[in-house]
Image (cartoon, coloured by chain):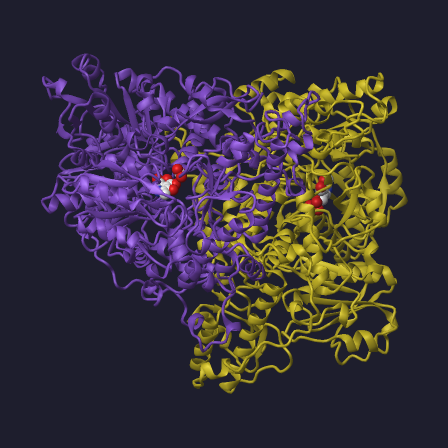
Chain colours: A purple, B yellow
Amino acid sequence: MLRSIRLIQRVANFSRLANPHEVNPKVPDWFKSSDYIEPRFIGSEPQQVKEMLKSVEANSLDELVDKIIPKEIRSEAAFQSPDNFPDAITESAMVQHLQSLANKNKIYKNYIGQGFYGTHTPYVILRNVLEDPGWYTSYTPYQAEISQGRLEALLNYQTVITELTGMDVSNASLLDEATAAGEAMFLANSWFEKKKFFVDNHVFPQSIEHIKTKAYYLGIDIVVGDAKTYDFKDADQYCGVLVQSPDNMGEVHDWSDLFKHTLKDAKLLKIIGTDLLSLTINKTPKDQGANVAYGNSQRFGVPMGFGGPHAAFFAVEDEFKRKMPGRIIGISKDANGRSAYRMSLQTREQHIRREKATSNICTAQALLANMAGLYATYHGPQGLQKIANRVNCLARSFAKLAKSLGIVVKEGRIFDTVVLHNTENLQEYLHYNAQINVRKTGQDTIFSFDETHTLQDVEDLFNHLQHFTKKKADFMSVIQKVIPYKSERAPYMQQKVFNSLHSETEMLRYINYLRQKDISLAKSMISLGSCTMKLNPTSFMLPVSFQGFSQLHPFSPLSCTQGYQELTDNVEKWLCDITQMEAVSLMPNSGAQGEYTGLLCIRKYHIMNGQKDRNICLIPISAHGTNPASAVLAGLNVVAVNVIDGYVDLNDLNKKIKENEKSLACMMITYPSTYGVYEDQTKKIIQLIHDHGGLVYMDGANMNAQVGYTSPGYLGADVCHLNLHKTFSIPHGGGGPGLGPIAVNKKLAPYLPGREHSLGSVASSLYSSASIIPIPYSYFGQLGRQGAKKCTAMAMLNANYLMKNLKNDYKVLFTGQNGMCAHEFIIDIRPIKQESGITEEDIAKRLMDYGFHAPTMSFPVPGTLMIEPTESESKSELDRFIEAMKNIKLEIEKVKNGQYDKNDNPLKNAPHTQDQVINSGWNHKYSREEAAFPLPFVMQRGKVWPTVSRINNAFGDRNLICQCPSVSDYQQ
Amino acid sequence: MLRSIRLIQRVANFSRLANPHEVNPKVPDWFKSSDYIEPRFIGSEPQQVKEMLKSVEANSLDELVDKIIPKEIRSEAAFQSPDNFPDAITESAMVQHLQSLANKNKIYKNYIGQGFYGTHTPYVILRNVLEDPGWYTSYTPYQAEISQGRLEALLNYQTVITELTGMDVSNASLLDEATAAGEAMFLANSWFEKKKFFVDNHVFPQSIEHIKTKAYYLGIDIVVGDAKTYDFKDADQYCGVLVQSPDNMGEVHDWSDLFKHTLKDAKLLKIIGTDLLSLTINKTPKDQGANVAYGNSQRFGVPMGFGGPHAAFFAVEDEFKRKMPGRIIGISKDANGRSAYRMSLQTREQHIRREKATSNICTAQALLANMAGLYATYHGPQGLQKIANRVNCLARSFAKLAKSLGIVVKEGRIFDTVVLHNTENLQEYLHYNAQINVRKTGQDTIFSFDETHTLQDVEDLFNHLQHFTKKKADFMSVIQKVIPYKSERAPYMQQKVFNSLHSETEMLRYINYLRQKDISLAKSMISLGSCTMKLNPTSFMLPVSFQGFSQLHPFSPLSCTQGYQELTDNVEKWLCDITQMEAVSLMPNSGAQGEYTGLLCIRKYHIMNGQKDRNICLIPISAHGTNPASAVLAGLNVVAVNVIDGYVDLNDLNKKIKENEKSLACMMITYPSTYGVYEDQTKKIIQLIHDHGGLVYMDGANMNAQVGYTSPGYLGADVCHLNLHKTFSIPHGGGGPGLGPIAVNKKLAPYLPGREHSLGSVASSLYSSASIIPIPYSYFGQLGRQGAKKCTAMAMLNANYLMKNLKNDYKVLFTGQNGMCAHEFIIDIRPIKQESGITEEDIAKRLMDYGFHAPTMSFPVPGTLMIEPTESESKSELDRFIEAMKNIKLEIEKVKNGQYDKNDNPLKNAPHTQDQVINSGWNHKYSREEAAFPLPFVMQRGKVWPTVSRINNAFGDRNLICQCPSVSDYQQ
Ligand SMILES: Cc1ncc(COP(=O)(O)O)c(C=O)c1O
Ligand SMILES: Cc1ncc(COP(=O)(O)O)c(C=O)c1O
Ligand SMILES: O=C([O-])O
């Protein structure tokens, strides 16, 4: 059903990108270009590298690597030749090359619709959000005190969703519309605990396809039928009914009759898929009796990007909020009683609830949700309604014009989509003669209008129709009769924020105001362990904005997508080389979604091999929460395996294998382990699993410790995912977008999406977040074989340098061979807590007073901090961090020895805000200066101020508020 | 000599841009596109406009305008038809249209050189400086306390210049290389007071041409000769000798012999024009005995942009610093004794010294100087040297390769430029067969290499030469023999800032660190009177980055520049319509340069009419300092005319006219006057001047009060300049770029640059800052007739609303008819000072504590503030400003009535920094909260912190430091 799916065959003719003279050893060095990214990407100068090597007692990077990575697991085969992995090319050459690829995509006038629409990204949002590192390099706002900017923006987004859908609570985005539909089905299934689910046959085919995929592995029975005619006598067998409006054929429905009468008392979830723009004039899902509304917000200013990324929305009635998938931003209070934003109800989520989570969502689509929210804010309710009416009038004009030529037009109320019956060959006619792409189903030709279309476009279409039909009619007299529908909506979006930021100046200042509240990589190191917050080079980001990449509809004909084909073929090839695997799917658009997809591969494999009862998934207790959550969604039963001192407990593993001998489906392994060590028993473990008929899934989050030196394939894994938004420089966007492709070996290759025994579909389009694929492409092509390896080695050097310099002050929890860590390490705060009462949270919050983002807190071990500096940080930045951590240790000592009060000290009260320290009534037992400027560099570099003090999470969860107050804080 | 000069003939076929349906009154409103800029550009919502109109007692905008602008001067003729001034088109349509214009420029491989070179703009600088409103919307750093970011960047730039040239002091940029050469000549002339000046004939022709122009009107005698052979027996007749290295033909000279021996004791200024990149390996001008070094910094990361903008540099020996033209950034101390940056030696400049100033420079090229400085910082000394060696090796390889084919190559040491003798038709051959542009002079073909070229390019050229000569030779064996020259330089740029920011992460953070220190339009209103700090819409800015505009060499063949021709023709046409003038020249690239050019026009006119003795220029004492400074540079004698109550004193005017009856050249008038009122006597004054044989120059800085309602042409002026960087949305860039085209009537049209009786040349290329012309183009095309007029009316409404709301607290100095102001107004602080001791400076600095940039201080009247809000500010922003000003008035009252100490009060101590208010030792007679958070909005909006306290200017001027200290503050 996915238009662009082509059966993928490995292309051998991918391009060697580098200019021959640049890699010719006979050409003297001084002729070689100097704009290579490698020295820019690596944070430290050569001199600093030397100093760090000395500090960790290694004579060279090679020696360091030898010390850290066990010999048994080393494999550099894939990096030997530019035929598997390219030589580096320069920044400017890559930008030009990607421009030429973008130009190979043909941007025809587009009326394809079906969930993806042209949109005008307001330029002020384009430049100052999508293209601003202050926004795109920040992390998911776990540390809320230095994330109030994007949290406010996400709350605005949620408010837009609840206001437009009429629902009570919205989440802060899901991955795309198809998975949102799947999540709705899963919610129905787990709420009502019934195994049958009804889907209207006019729902978007990509949504139905994913629902079917998801249901198949969960053993849910999907009935696809016509909800308008189906009698629902068997309603009590269903856990949910999912319909759509406007539907796939453009018809606007009022489902009130079905949901409020026919199914009034049925114990099932009533779900409406919908379109935000249409909701500015049409009846809300809530008013139609829905419990859940979902859809996507792409047409609110987010470029189509050949499928993504964009934010899907998901909103529910109050009753269901605690089972809702995805992040929810809420308003709580800080230590001073002021209101403050943070992620609420986190107890629902995978990182807390693991296999009992409401979904596996971790990275979502924060940046794109923020764009959509800001788009709605910029237009305001009147502006949106004006756009909707205009689109609707264009569509209805076109329908009337077609009728005036004798064409049979599908009847029924429409919003933006017009179906012309019996128009065989019209699609081809328009494509070849007019460079216009439209949709076609059987004998029908379908046109969807959007805000980028003009009346001139309608006239052009009409002129083509006149040629096509060889008939004539009058344009102006027809269109003059079309007037906007009367709105079915009561006033909405009346909050001040949506009614005061309509000038570009005001919007620019609002965006700037929000951005300055947050810590991003533009301000300081973000040493979140397991998150690999490395440089997102500007030259990797530029191509994302190229029209040839950003303006393409994902269901465009293949002939229009040659540029993307080359792009994806090469990235798949390079990912195969890096992982030493056989095949790759770029469909999953987050790490968790990669896990899910990989596990479906495994399940499909067992099913196809007649072993469908293999349904046990072994997961070490140290695994990331997404692992068990994904396993459950894949229909697997999770069995936890113990871990001792950072290593999988082999006894326990053997025991669990034995207990599940027949039903062992697979084991999930993270490598290097979440504890930051290369387990040298990994190969053995993999063998063990294989010996018992299971397959091995490798969580690729820590790929930054493998690239160039070892690989999941070499280690024997059958499938792994890669977080391109960690290892390969896709920026984290404040909580997404992500891209979590999976790589599989020969065994599993046939089950990838789009291949012969496809596991099904896990996204709305084949490449999901296609428009950000140029970023990893640039990573591979600009760093090349040498550079990519060097990044790995430098990541290890930075981590070991940090560890070495902190280990006298903080207990390092685990190390590998030679007492070294991999690319990250864990410090244990539990002993400190015992002695002083100071917790890992106190330290994390105190770091904000020093201008730093905290490392990962209490994962994988409660009471610890996990630190991952990445290769992009310079020695000077690491030294600053060391200085801060050492000073914090001194502060802890003062608490211990009574120089600081046990409760009233800079750590317990951290972080400190401006109004606290600039307060005549300051009465703490330490000074303002100690609070705000604990070290000289804090002021010298420009103090980064947390804008709220420590946030009370429990309060927020008890008193859930997930929408904008009616008057925004921003302007008085 | 300027390659691209074509004799301009008004094109009649400029495009009506708007789509017919969009402007067809028969098409219902709801079909019209909704992405027009107008409602985004105007700050206020319609409801707010109503409220403001009520406040100023007008029923409509039309009525308001009628009240303000005298009937006698109204003329809206030029705005009647889309044939003179276009209908608005949408944002997206304009961006597409400009993309298509850009695509009409042909970006061939370019070796033209001659002062303009391909360069790789580091992407991190491109995105985060050139494309970041935090940088490009800020003003010239007169208010240093909230400008420390760009001041530091400019100091870095100056340091790069002094380090590379070896000179003692550098300014912070001039307009371009040709004008820098002209300034050098002027300095020589005014220092040594002699009328003869020698220019080597191998200086760039565009520099010679401008020197000749400038000299002509100053009565300086230019001798162009061969400095290597000229015997200089008559040396003592010369005020200066100007040579260049590398010269126009690429030869690198060591002028030591000439300057240190031949001219050792001559009383003349020794000037070397030079190339920054070459100086990384070649002997410095200082070491060659120069007193002055100049050149341009374009190839340090600034796109060629068909000529500009980019920053010219100018550096002198210590002795000459107080006569140096242009801004100089220096280090001084703030009120707390901490070092702080500010503009130093301002007493040299036009705004203080008027006709005695060292130059007329006001707006310069700050943004581009910052880019160049950051480029050098990012590469560091080693990086720059590597680039230089590579370029040099490419050039020398090419020379050797050409020789190997038997071509005669010019001898002598070269840097980047190779001259092939006797190669007739080679230029044409390469242009037509290979899409390669090179330079040609007579029988010579000239190739200049730059960092964007690769060895592959050299091989390609070589292959073409083989075809052209029909000979063969071996490539690899030749190039392998080329090795870099030994550097002639001692170590340079050893300061920490140049040796620690080479990774993209570090550079990104440094840029961010600098930006966050400054107030720009992204933070709050900048109500600088006379500066028109209006919105710089993102969609106007995007095209500046389009390759078709940014990558074109200014001396490209006409056939490659069709896009620019359409662009400039239209802009010229529209400027003619707006000014109701006959012809326009886009050559002057600042307002002051516009004045200068316009005055040359007048001088040339008188000369051509046999009245070369008309050399008196009447200027009201209220005029901007650039007026008298420009007049002097144009060879005119300034006679000041009195002003009474804001109006030209007619008695004094008559007297001055009488006194100068025979020699009256012209009068300069600012309209509306610098006092913000429409003088209704203006037409009379103009008549008077005309009656006495003089012409009238109109300073167009206040065009924002005229557009659509009246015009210089209608008022009777003969010539005016327009500050496109005020009225037409070119951002101010923190002190440039600017664009100051002049418009002239029929009488003066023949004297424009490039026309029959051309006045000469005032810039290095015909369109000087060509690449920013898309911005005013967008202004005209996106706002259209209605929008442009509305901007004028709204600017007046905003000014009058502010005035109305402040006039009870502050004395308004002048108003026009009906007690209204035009687009700006002046408040008089002198009475306040008398009563309370609080000065205009105290108020200006105190506004920083409220997060505002001060209005213009003490211009045109000492002891006042001039306020110009522009149409882009919303009522809410104006209300915030009013609230701040009213609260400041309350504070002043407290000083007056003794509630605040006379000296230790928030006004005298303003602005307050973080370390002041977060200091346990706070011992002021008012609270920290009063200091830092005087009103609730200050914290709510995110406090904008001045990073230094009040700066001691006198200290800085006494102790001049204009270079980076050897260890930067930034990182410990
Ligand atoms: C070890 C590990 N696995 C999986 C994931 C999930 O990836 P994503 O957030 O893209 O869903 C993460 C995310 O941080 C992780 O650290
Ligand atoms: C009235 C007036 N004239 C001339 C100028 C000079 O313009 P520029 O700064 O572009 O040289 C200014 C600049 O502020 C001005 O206000
Ligand atoms: O995002 C993480 O949960 O690590």
The quadrant the N terminus of chain B occupies is bottom right
Check the image and report above or below for B136 versus B274: above
Q: Position of residue A82 (x, y in %)?
A: 35, 66
Query: Residue A872, can we see it?
Result: yes
Would residue A303 appear left or right of A660 to someone viewing this image? right
Along the viewing direction, whichever of B201 and A678 lies nearer the viewer: A678
Quarter residue A232 falls in: top left
Whether residue A34 is situated above or below residue A428 in the rendered picture: below
Residue located at (83% from left, 78% from top): B262
Residue B84 visible? no
Vertical relation: A650 (above or below) B386: above
* Residue A306 or residue B780, whichever sits in front: A306
Q: Position of residue A791 (x, y in %)?
A: 45, 57
- Locate residue B300, reporting x and y percent: 60, 59
Report ligand 3 position as a quadrant. top left
Pinpoint residue A913: horizontal percent, then vertical percent: 61, 28
Nearest the camera: B563 or A881? A881
Is residue B586 toward the left or the right of residue A381 in the image?
Answer: right
Left or right: B744 in relation to B29: right
User: How many numbered marks are there?
Assistant: 0
- Say which of A663 and A312 sits in front: A663
In the displayed structure, does residue A713 sit left or right of residue B963? left
In the rendered view, tell whether residue A821 sits above or below residue B915: below
* Residue at x 49% of width, y 83% of height: B478
